Image (cartoon, rainbow, N blue to C red):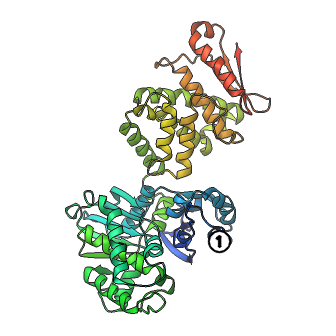
């Protein structure tokens, strides 16, 4: 990036919303401003996992203030993500629509593993280069991320639904600290984290690092009391728990180095951290300055692998795991991309298409959907498109946001069958173009061999919401089954606001 470029990262966490702003100087990011507000959205989920109106309003008020500070930034200079609370919230769309407008930028809800990847990137770039095997622990408000890696490369990542806000609400709801409450909270945390034992066992890493949230709060409190700065030890955790038990309640807790906004959730955070230490046999953990926001900034700077490469690996992993037909997926993707290029060429100036980043992203996502369109066949050939859509809607795929995965799942769901029952926004013309091209490609590749595309042209007609597929004279006679399936496709689109016509050249 050019010298002096401004960048900003927004992290909508379960406890706090954070905004970090800085500039690129000599190839590195230097912070110029940092804003943090304790929003506690993690406490705002009702029993049905909906954000309460009060929790949404707290978030909107904060984002309006952040949005005012971000006025004048370009879309490529800001990245905003939301984590566990909005992953869980059933009504997150209701919150996000106003939130995007107030902030002025798209807020991406990311998966747990994508959050873990970004956390590791943020931590790794803040540490000296070396070959040590690292364990990174990030205890947030409603989730805990565990990552193994070396250098800049994470190797194992997982996110667990246990955190400081959730555990404080559940086991310290009255703000009272009792030995029984700590015992129950630690047992419950270990029950959730127990499956991490095999992957994150003690011989799998050399040094343990703690990032953000709870770890920083504990390390700061220990340092203020005279413990070694920048470290958390088992003895330190025991000392801190004794201090909380002596205070008996969060209201009465007075500790140097602990911020006021941390007192109400330190009981839950400490319980989870103690559980992590016990399960993973950690004796000492180093505090690190890097975290999720820094991973976002690192990505914006282009210092990590290109995001499309990360996504490409995720698509390949899913395709391999579920045993898709690789050759057929690539064939369908090639035909779908060919049709989309034709279609966009009829809408845009042809010379601008290769340089159009939107067109490039559409083509790439269409190819991914094509490669994964039969992913559900691993479960059952009957209604495999429905199984495939379910897999993608519930997959952890690094590099993808949850809305992006949902769009892929809708393409997979809609690549065959009736369109009128498809719950999609048919006013989104770009998505409709992708869906049409994928469906046509699947039809043209029905014999599972390369189709004859000579003389086939897909265009956007002058009539409203209309497409036309033209074929050369004699094509329908040469490929009667394909022609029959295309005529059936015309009928399918008649049940939507769009229409498809066939023309015999």
Residue pictured at 40% horizontal, 74% vertical = 289
Residue pictured at 49% horizontal, 62% vertical = 84
The outermost residue toward the front is: 180
Work out whether 444 lies above or below 160: above
Task: Pinpoint residue 425: horizontal percent, then vertical percent.
Answer: 68, 42
Q: Which residue bears the numbered disc 1?
A: 54
Q: 410 or 316: which is nearer to us?
A: 410
Q: Is residue 5 visible?
A: no
Task: Pinpoint residue 80: horizontal percent, then vertical percent.
Answer: 56, 62
The outermost residue toward the right is: 463
Element type at mark 1: helix
Task: Pinpoint residue 430: horizontal percent, then vertical percent.
Answer: 66, 40
Q: Residues within 10 Å of mark 1 (few under 14, many from 20)?
A: few
Quadrant housing the C terminus: top right
Q: Is residue 158 visible?
A: yes
Number of numbered labels in the structure image: 1
Residue pictured at 44% horizontal, 91% vertical = 253
In the image, is 225 to the left or to the right of 483?
left
Res. 211 image quadrant: bottom left
Work out whether 433 lies above or below 404: above
Task: Pinpoint residue 194: horizontal percent, then vertical percent.
Answer: 30, 62
Q: 168 or 306: which is nearer to us?
A: 168
Res. 66 image quadrant: bottom right
């Amino acid at each position: 990036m050019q010298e002096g470029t401004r960048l900003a990262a927004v992290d909508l966490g379960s406890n706090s919303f954070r905004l970090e702003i800085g500039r690129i100087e000599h190839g590195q990011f230097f912070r110029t401003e940092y804003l943090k507000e304790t929003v506690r959205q993690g406490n705002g989920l009702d029993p049905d996992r909906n954000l309460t109106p009060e929790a949404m309003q707290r978030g909107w008020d904060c984002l309006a203030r952040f949005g005012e500070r971000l006025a004048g930034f370009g879309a490529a200079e800001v990245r905003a993500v939301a984590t566990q609370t909005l992953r869980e919230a059933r009504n997150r769309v209701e919150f996000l629509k106003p939130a995007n407008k107030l902030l002025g930028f798209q807020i991406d809800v990311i998966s747990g593993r994508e959050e873990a990847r970004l956390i590791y990137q943020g931590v790794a770039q803040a540490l000296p280069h070396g070959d040590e095997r690292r364990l990174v622990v990030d205890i947030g408000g409603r989730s805990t991320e565990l990552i193994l890696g070396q250098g800049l490369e994470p190797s194992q990542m997982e996110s667990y639904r246990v955190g400081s806000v959730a555990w404080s609400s559940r086991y310290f709801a009255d703000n009272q600290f009792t030995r029984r409450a700590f015992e129950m909270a630690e047992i419950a945390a270990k029950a959730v984290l127990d499956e991490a034992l095999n992957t994150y066992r003690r011989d799998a890493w050399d040094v343990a690092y703690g990032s953000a949230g709870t770890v920083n709060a504990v390390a700061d409190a220990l340092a203020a009391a005279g413990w070694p700065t920048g470290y958390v030890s088992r003895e330190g955790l025991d000392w801190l728990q004794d201090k909380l038990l002596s205070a008996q309640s969060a209201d009465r807790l007075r500790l140097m180095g602990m911020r006021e906004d941390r007192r109400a959730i330190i009981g839950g955070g400490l319980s989870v951290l103690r559980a992590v230490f016990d399960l993973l046999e950690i004796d000492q953990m180093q505090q690190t300055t890097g975290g999720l926001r820094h991973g976002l900034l690192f990505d914006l700077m282009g210092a990590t692998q290109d995001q499309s490469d990360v996504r490409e690996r995720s698509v390949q992993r899913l395709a391999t795991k579920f045993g898709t037909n690789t050759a057929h997926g690539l064939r369908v993707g090639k035909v779908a991309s060919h049709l989309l290029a034709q279609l966009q060429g009829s809408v845009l100036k042809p010379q601008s298409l290769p340089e159009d980043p939107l067109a490039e992203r559409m083509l790439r996502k269409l190819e991914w959907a094509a490669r994964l369109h039969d992913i559900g066949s691993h479960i059952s050939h009957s209604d495999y498109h429905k199984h495939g859509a379910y897999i993608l809607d519930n997959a952890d795929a690094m590099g993808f946001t949850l809305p992006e995965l949902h769009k892929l799942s809708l393409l997979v769901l809609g690549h065959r069958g009736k369109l009128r029952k498809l719950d999609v926004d048919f006013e989104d013309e770009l998505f409709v173009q992708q869906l049409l091209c994928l469906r046509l490609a699947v039809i043209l590749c029905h014999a599972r061999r390369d189709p004859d595309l000579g003389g086939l042209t897909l265009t956007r007609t002058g009539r409203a919401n209309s497409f036309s597929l033209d074929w050369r004279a004699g094509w329908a006679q040469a490929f009667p089954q394909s022609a029959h399936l295309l005529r059936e496709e015309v009928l399918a689109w008649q049940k939507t606001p769009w229409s498809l016509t066939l023309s015999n050249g």
